Amino acid sequence: MTAVDVYIPGTSPLHRWDPRAKLMVGALYTASVLAIPVARSWVLFCFGALLVSAFGASRLPAGRVLMRLGPVAGLIGLAGLGMLFEGSPARFVSVSGKAALCAGCGVLMAATTQFGAMLAAMRSFRFPDILTAVSGLAHRHVFVALDEACRMMVAYRCRVPQASPLRRLRHTTRLALALCLRSAMRTERIERCLLVRGFDGVLRTLPLTAPTRADVVATAATAIVCGALLVVGYL
Amino acid sequence: MNAIELRGISFGYRGGPPILRDVSFSVAVGECAGLIGPNGAGKSTLILLMNGLLRGQGEVLALGQSVLGVAPRDLRKRVGVVFQDPDDQLFMPNVLEDVALGPLNLGSSPAEADHLARTALESAGILYAADRAPHRLSLGERKRVALAAILAMKPEVLVLDEPTAGLDPRGRHEFMELLQSFPATKIIASHDLDLVARVCGRVLVLDGGRLVAAGPVATILSDQPLLAAHGLAPPLSALPAAPAV
């Protein structure tokens, strides 16, 4: 089930960077990219260079990163389609460039930050408890449900090697229903496990450690570069 | 003093047949008792009653006090339950946070909870996985984390439901050694009679919701007619060795 996990383990500086700093810089980068006017789309190339250098520093496998960026091609296609009805080549470059950069930033953050650390960062920025608690539980159990679904599909294929598409659809629907029932039963067991561990409605977690000086310097430097590029975009 | 005492416990889910009928036994402080029986005997239900998660007729006493008269937080400190499927028990995005959840819920400070979690992970031999996500661990490792999650709460009585189910022989062997190393009172519900023979001092046989036999491990596990009558087989360790070919 690790194949669907967006985090790619590593020891690069980006992996070690404080998740709060990454969340802050990611938000700043995205906001700066989105704020660049259409007429100054060439600034997006500078933002692109910044992102590519960050990818280089992360030492992530290029193949996996490109595969994850694949869906952005769809967005760019949509932007191109929109150009047929209204817009201009400059707007197309702006929209597709911004989409690619924002998606790239998201992919980089998700691939270098464990989901738990990201949730802890969100909590430290006072994101609502209910949001972080539900996201944490959902993230964990998505993998359990996927694992169960894969096992059910393998067992199904062993018993039904060939079937018409309609029959297969009917069977798949039943499998999905069975999976929902199993998940409901699992929910009951999870509730018991939570109670056994003293759960009283609040999902308590450990605080993050204080950011290092290197974290602070890297955050400040990236923020200054983003800010400078934004200023250039409006000059 | 008894760590756990059950007095005339009967239980059935609403609209269903009775699952437990007039079950009475006690487990002394420091003792390790094995709870064995065929599928559907009521072992898992009994475990839920011991922790106050279900309420039946009769009385359950944990360290001399009725589980219904103790505040839930105090009861969780007294009786810790390790469930059969670690995927039900591990719900946080990483191992350390998961193990620290119990101590934090019991009122420990974050620093204290972090220390308790790391100590429990170390004693379960899984500290190396502290920063990993649970779905990146093998079943054996997840079982160890589930055990550490309860050990971090420092329970006085440790109740385990099928702790070695699904483990390979090496994992099973290591888990048995791990359980043997904990001095707390233990109640182990299991089909794994080798585990019971090795770790427990006394055995309770449950069938059809009734306690049908109780006694020292050597006596019960060598009583083949009794085991056969209740859908059990003697542990492999008790069988004569196969002749050399």
Image (cartoon, coloured by chain):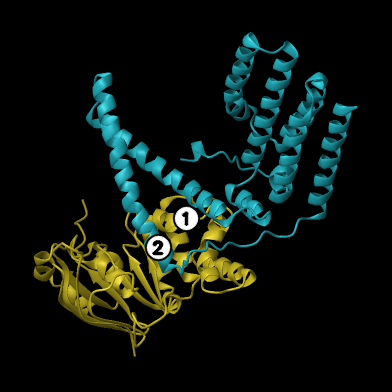
Query: Residue B44 location in percent, x, y?
Result: 27, 65
In the figure, A59 relative to A22: above or below? above
Q: Nearer the viewer, residue A34 or B37?
A: A34
What secondary structure is found at the residue carrying circle 1?
loop
Q: Nearer the viewer, residue B227 or B139?
A: B139
Q: Which chain is yellow?
A: B
Looking at the rendered image, the quarter that the N terminus of chain B falls into is bottom left
Question: Hey, what amino acid is under mark 1?
Answer: Phe
Question: Hey, what amino acid is under mark 2?
Answer: Cys
- Left or right of B73: which side holds A109? right
Does any portion of residue B57 appear in the rendered image? yes
Question: Residue at position x 42%, y 55% from top?
Answer: B140
In the figure, residue B118 lies in which quadrant? bottom right
User: Which residue of the protein is positioned furthest toward the bottom in this rendering?
Assistant: B1
In the rendered image, which residue does mark 2 sit on?
A: A193
Query: Residue B18 location in percent, x, y?
Result: 15, 67
Q: Residues within 10 Å of mark 2 (few under 14, many from 20)?
A: many
User: Which residue of the protein is positioned furthest toward the right in this rendering?
Assistant: A235
State if disc 2 and disc 1 touch (CB < 8 Å). Answer: yes
- Label 2: chain letter: A
Q: Which chain is cyan?
A: A
* Residue B91's disc number: 1
In the figure, residue A126 lies in which quadrant? bottom right
Query: Residue B85 location in percent, x, y?
Result: 36, 56
Does any portion of residue B221 appear in the rendered image? no
